[in-house]
């Protein structure tokens, strides 16, 4: 008995249905996790995270955010140059700040990247390559983050023993990646993806820059979480906090959240409880981190507001008609 393959119009309909329902599913999942945390611990830990914020912590988040944004823009510039749609570093930094602010304030968490990709595609005259440059640049972050997380968890002292299911999770992740590669094999986009990877990521002059920038970005985000944990009263050493921070932030890589909130707080509650620091303490640290991360993107608002003002001034200098 043979099963007929779905027709192209059926595949397009299925893809459209997934695209229509997926945003609702991710928001619902994030809301459920967040609601469970509030139901279990109450609003106190969230308020504790907010009231723990102070000027030194905000300044530290802005400084760390500046470094990570510059490195992210540098990574994007290298990838874009490999695809033949390079851009000046100054332009990349401004665009990246704007995209981060939109990602942090709009539902979905990716609309800023979409905006950045579309603008770059139009400006470069190569819409497809411009959008792929953003997609490749964004994809490198999670890969480096997960790799560093495994290394740090293996090398640094943990406040708890590794659970029995840790090797199972790693094995499942490897199987999933291998399955994805096999699924893409023979797909009409495979040749394009391979060419992109060779030119933008694996080139001899590209991969050291992309890797260095990505490592700095990942460690910068983890350092911000360590700052958030310390101001909320966690007395653990940075060596103990760093792997925990990496694990909490790894949970954020799953696109199931409400503006970044949800899995982060749930993961922090569970990991901090396992470490003996208390679930409420984890939620407070995650809350402080969320606010600090948002404040670090505020320069992006300035960038977004400056663009319309710049166009307005250009019209005043060169009036139409």
Image: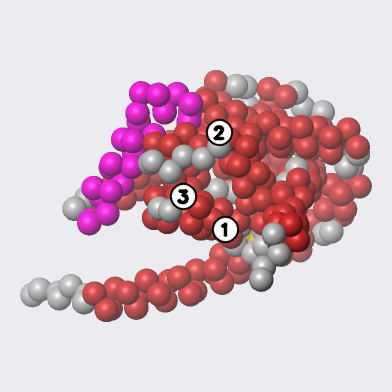
Q: Which mark is residue 124?
A: 3
- Residue receiving disc 2: 74
Q: Secondary structure at mark 3?
A: helix
Say if residue 15 shows up in the picture: yes
Position above or below: 2 against 218: below
Check contact, mark 3 vs mark 1: CB within 8 A: no
| Position of residue 273 measured from the top left corner of the image (x, y, whole percent) | 71, 42
Quadrant of the image occupied by residue 107: bottom right
Label 2: element kind: helix
In percent of width and height, residue 105 lies at 71, 59
| Camera-nearest label, 3 or 2 | 3
Which tag, 3 or 1, sits closer to the chain's start? 1
Residue ID at (39%, 36%): 82
User: Does label 3 or label 2 sit earlier along the sequence?
Assistant: 2
Q: Which residues are magenta?
A: 187-211
Residue 110 position within the rendered picture, expressed as x and y whole percent measured from the top left: 57, 57
Task: Judge the density around disc 2: few (<14), some (14-19), many (≥20) Cα neighbours within 10 Å.
Answer: many
Residue at numbered disc 1: 115
Question: Is 137 within the magenta?
Answer: no
Looking at the rendered image, the quarter that the N terminus falls into is bottom left
User: What distance separates the C-alpha of mark 3 from that of mark 1?
Assistant: 14 Å
């Amino acid at each position: 008995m043979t099963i007929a393959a779905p027709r192209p119009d059926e595949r397009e309909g299925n893809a459209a249905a997934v695209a229509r329902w997926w945003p609702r599913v991710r928001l619902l999942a994030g809301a459920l996790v967040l609601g469970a945390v509030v139901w279990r611990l109450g609003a106190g830990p969230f308020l504790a995270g907010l009231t723990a914020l102070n000027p030194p912590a905000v300044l530290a988040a802005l400084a760390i955010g500046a470094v990570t944004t510059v490195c992210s823009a540098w990574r994007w510039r290298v990838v874009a140059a490999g695809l033949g749609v390079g851009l000046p570093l100054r332009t990349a930094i401004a665009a990246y700040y704007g995209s981060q602010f939109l990602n942090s304030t709009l539902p979905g968490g990716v609309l800023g990247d979409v905006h950045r990709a579309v603008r770059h595609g139009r400006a470069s005259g190569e819409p497809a390559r411009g959008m792929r440059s953003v997609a490749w640049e964004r994809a490198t972050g999670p890969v480096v983050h997960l790799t560093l997380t495994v290394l740090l968890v293996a090398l640094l002292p943990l406040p708890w023993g590794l659970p029995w299911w840790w090797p199972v999770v790693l094995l499942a992740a490897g199987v999933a990646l291998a399955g994805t590669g096999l699924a893409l094999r023979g797909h009409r986009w495979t040749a394009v993806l391979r060419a992109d990877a060779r030119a933008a990521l694996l080139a001899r002059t590209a991969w050291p820059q992309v890797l260095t920038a990505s490592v700095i970005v990942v460690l910068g985000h983890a350092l911000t979480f360590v700052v958030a944990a310390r101001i909320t009263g966690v007395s653990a050493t940075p060596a103990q906090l760093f792997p925990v921070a990496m694990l909490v932030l790894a949970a954020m890589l799953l696109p199931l959240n409400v503006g970044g909130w949800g899995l982060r707080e749930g993961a922090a509650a569970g990991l901090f409880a396992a470490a003996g620091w208390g679930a409420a303490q984890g939620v407070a640290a995650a809350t402080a981190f969320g606010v600090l991360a948002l404040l670090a993107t505020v320069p992006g608002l300035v960038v977004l507001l400056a663009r319309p003002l710049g166009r307005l001034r250009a019209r005043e200098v060169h009036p139409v008609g």
